[in-house]
Image (cartoon, rainbow, N blue to C red):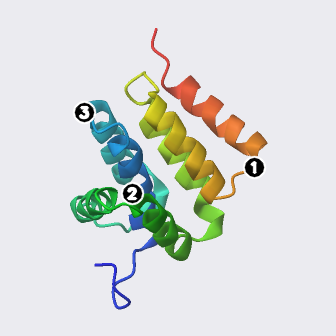
Amino acid sequence: MTDETHPLSPQDCLVAVMIAVSMSDEDIRTAELVKIDSAVNMLPVFADFDADRVRTVSSLVADLFEQEDGLDALFGLVRANLPERLFETAYALACDVAAADGTLRETELRLLEEIRYELNIDRLHAAAIERGARARHLSV
């Protein structure tokens, strides 16, 4: 799937970032999966995306996470295949997945920090994105 003839699509990259956040604490929660599914089915950026690819991308991310430098490889793939104009979108989706279950775990926070760094998300923009995610996921 990731050879030169079949590079990741921009949508694959967005899904990979969301899956990575969900897998980061080694406990994929239902709320996180529902959030990913909802994003893929509802957001305009996924309008022409084949939702069946989520499973393929999930397998790729799981395989990468088993490798010593897998996270670096994932970020390399994302930077190579995701247009820079969608870097903040990737971060926003990552924040939504992290916030989906109402609890931000240390591993999720570390991965979000790494995503900010790897995708060169401005700190002020990141804070606004994080605040929006927090506001969307509050409960009464």
Measure the C-alpha gap from mark 1 to mark 3: 30 Å
**Can I make out residue 20 in this image?**
yes
Dot in front, 1 or 3: 1
Q: Which residue lies under the disc numbered 2?
A: 15
Q: Amino acid at mark 1?
A: Asp
Q: Is residue 90 above or below residue 102?
A: below
Q: If you read the primary sequence from the N terminus, does the residue marked by circle 2 or circle 1 appear first?
A: 2
Q: Residue at x 27, y 60 (%)?
A: 51
**Local secondary structure at mark 2:** helix
Measure the C-alpha gap from mark 2 to mark 1: 22 Å
Q: Position of residue 83 (x, y in %)?
A: 59, 71
Q: Amino acid at mark 3?
A: Thr
Q: Position of residue 85 (x, y in %)?
A: 65, 65
User: Are the residues tagged 2 and 1 within 8 Å (C-beta)?
Assistant: no
Q: Which residue lies under the disc numbered 1?
A: 122
The disc placed on residue 39 is none
**Local secondary structure at mark 3:** helix
Question: In which quadrant is the N terminus drawn?
Answer: bottom left
Q: Residue at x 53, y 70 (%)?
A: 82
**Can I make out residue 47 in this image?**
no
**Local secondary structure at mark 1:** loop
Dot in front, 2 or 1: 1
User: Callout 2: 10 Å neighbours few (<14), some, many (20+)?
Assistant: many
Measure the C-alpha gap from mark 3 to mark 2: 16 Å
Name the image quarter holding residue 26.
Answer: top left
